[in-house]
Image: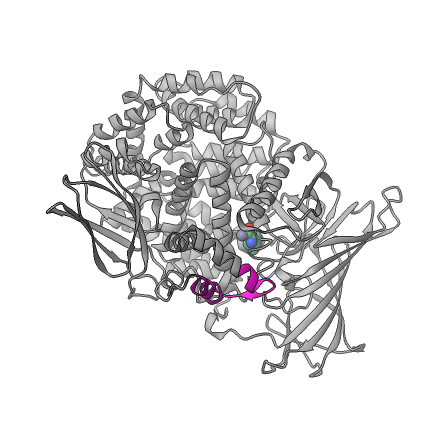
Amino acid sequence: MSDATAQTIYLEDYKPFGWIIDDVHLTFRLHPTATRVISRIRFRPDYDVHHRPFFLHGEGLKHISIKVDGHEVEPTHVDGGIEVDVPEAPFNWEAEVEINPEANTALEGLYMSNGMYCTQCEAEGFRKITWYPDRPDVMAQFTVRIESTASHTPVMLSNGNGLYTSTDQTQKDTPSVTIYQDPWPKPAYLFALVAGDLIAHEDKFTTMSGKEVNLAIWVRPGDEDKCAFGMEALKKSMTWDEEVYGREYDLDEFNIVAVDDFNMGAMENKGLNVFNSSCVLASPETSTDANFERIEAIIAHEYFHNWTGNRITCRDWFQLCLKEGLTVYRDQQFTADMRSEPVARIANVLALRGRQFPEDQGPLSHPVRPESFQEINNFYTATVYEKGAEVIGMLRTLVGADEYSKALDLYFDRHDGDAATIEDWLQVFEDSTGRDLTQFKRWYSQPGTPRVTVREDYADDTFTLHLSQSTAPTPGQDDKAPQVIPVNVGLLNPNGDEVMPTQTLELTETEQSFAFPGHATRPVPSILRGFSAPVILDHDIDNARRAFLLAHDTDPFNRWESGRMLARGSLMNSIATGAAPDLAYLNGLGAVLRDDTLDPAYRALMLGQPSQTELAGLLHDTGDTPDPEAIHIASEALRDAKAAALADVLPDLYQANQVKGAFSPEAGPAGQRALANAALSLLSRSDAGKQAAAQYQQADNMTQQLAALSCLLDAGQGAAQLASFQVQWAHDRLVMDKWFSLQIIHANPQDAATTTARLTEHKDFDMKNPNRFRAVMGALSMHHAGFHYRDGAAYALLADWLIRLDPLNPQTTARMCSAFQTWKRYDPARQEKITTQLDRILSQPNLSRDTTEMVSRIRD
Ligand code: 0A1
Ligand code: ZN
């Protein structure tokens, strides 16, 4: 094992830097293999802070020169940077370094993607660009000068406002200079530079105070027809943030750049957002409805960071949820406003249960605000992001929407320009609402998914709910104190009428009872409405009750949840006993699907069922060992049973939800397509793919084309369509990612690993491109029955590729290791096969810090 000496950083060790920076001047002389970076920085001592040696971060920099107040000095190279003798007084720093963007396959710092220069500095990438205090609490104004030639990089961009450009596109080979200035002090992680042959899709936005902002989405030539949707999403986001949070944009320009090689989804650099091209480029022919929805949400997310992240940033990386939890919460609110609130809520809960719950219940469990790390890039997790957003949602439920808005106003007033902490955030809420949040703060420090158990009583016209809470031990934290859990509850009478609208119960004790007097007949409770807290609800009720709630609950989330619980019960029963699927579920589902007053998107979600991974987790929870093959068989059997039981409604659903006219990615038509395609997938189980083949043939958009192809592949057909799809889309990297994934997703369990291995031999499999790597290896790791197929071939294949990728791109490698995080759920034979692979990864010489940390935590 390598890097055994990797340092652990602790929240409790936080110390301020000790110097203040007023401004930073950077000059970049661009060259693919030898870019020169010259930094001129004015430092002054922070006299309130005890001084330590003057240390600047720096990694992989070729030192050319350093001058302090004009005098050349020699730095002392220490771990992760340099120490330099400097005066205890203000001084001028001037340093020159050389870096090699072309060799940068880690995609962190300054790198090249398809001939274009691009940066990624969050979390700690700026130290790969120049010597600097690369920490979020050091904020400064940046002026950036980029030197190149018009032929090499016709377009050059950085943060803030463009001050000057000498670029003359007719003088291709004469030196050209562009200067950007960002008036807003920012930490280095928000720095960005982009240069290359780019085309802009431009627009304008007038802010609420009447300021005009130039908007542009910059793409590679050929992609300019895929920007219109993103631009609309950006303008909607700008308007929404003004209307809902009172936040106005604060620069003369806002630029978005699409990049093909990117480790994550997108990055909120001040005034210059950089996007993975998969998260911004959209057209009906190449993007599915799900892609459109995700693009809209990510554009909003990055834009919202301008206030929650950039104007108010984080003091240190332990506070990551301060910007991420809040910004995810804001983008979720935005999506709910733009589309359907219940559908958006269900989608968020599915994602939370699919990604965050397994994390929180396994070896990678960590608090929403972690207290230690080795590599911060490993903490851009579902817990920090999605559970972080749930924590904000609970706070809003507890204080109420109006108080939440007032507290947010105070937060922006009080902390604009600050690098803040969770303590600051909670203090704002305490000051604004007068509420004591001491217990609430445990949501930030206690990992694990709380389990809320419900018992009911009814006597003397009083209905009583007895609630209790507990959280299982997590790595390093055995004892959990009770948390404040907002439990939204409504009551129905036996006719299905609501007799008590939603109330928020505050569960603060380990056990607590809530009485509801005045009910002459025993009411039926609907508990945890809207999924008001990220907990596991343990409520032992029978199928008749669930079917009643599926038919009558006035809370759309819980109505869906009742159907889900029925499906789950049916599946668990089939897995345990081989029993046929449950009729109460199939009948209830039929009634919901026939109800044309319900939104098609909502009905499409009703047709879904728990994933095989979720079922494996549930089995593990109840003390059983999941058998992936049995889970797969039961899941398929339930689909067959649905196809049979709904045979009379599916053709109507399919026909009635065909959308006529020009394609629109709006929620209405997208919901209809979702329902029609869910119906098609069941219909295809009995017609050998006939209707799917017809749809494939007629499809004029990617949603219809991909859904049809998926149905065909599921039905064991589709070889011809797969081949023609490849020919049709060979030129489009993003669509080809779908082509790669699709074949793995729809492979039989026993073939998933060989199909994957075959695709890695394909000439277009490029491990250096994270999207392509994820399209292939991510698809394998998400194919539950295929990944866990008993021969262990998929484990070995994934490990092979992680070992190969690690030296090139540690970040993406480390993230993909989480495929192994659930290994303790499985039988000894599978456990042994997985741990063999984990140990093999760990034994690689020079394994990155990222991957070492992830695999060690998973292995523990
Ligand atoms: N802050 C970005 C996500 C992001 C994080 C890390 C990155 O590189 C390690 C890149 C992007 C967001 O929340 O959108
Ligand atoms: Zn974010």
Position of residue 373 relative to residue 714, above or below, is below
The answer to whether residue 314 shows anywhere in this view is no
Q: Where does the C terminus fall, quadrant-wise? A: bottom left
Q: Position of residue 316 (x, y in %)?
A: 53, 66
- Residue positioned 53% across, 20% down in the render: 699
Residue span colored magenta: 411-432
Q: Is residue 330 visible?
A: yes
Image side of residue 354 versus residue 118, left or right: left
Residue that extends furthest to the front in the rendered view of this protein: 518
Q: Would you say the magenta stretch is mainly helix, strand or loop?
A: helix
699 vs 588, left or right, is: right
In percent of the image, x 37 and y 55: which residue is there? 398
Instruction: Report the front residue among 93 and 1.
Output: 93
Relative depth, front residue between 466 and 58 = 466
Residue 501: x and y in percent read 29, 42
Query: In this orientation, which residue lies closer to the viewer: 660 or 219?
Result: 660
- Quadrant of the rendered image containing residue 299: top right
Q: Quadrant of residue 74?
A: bottom right
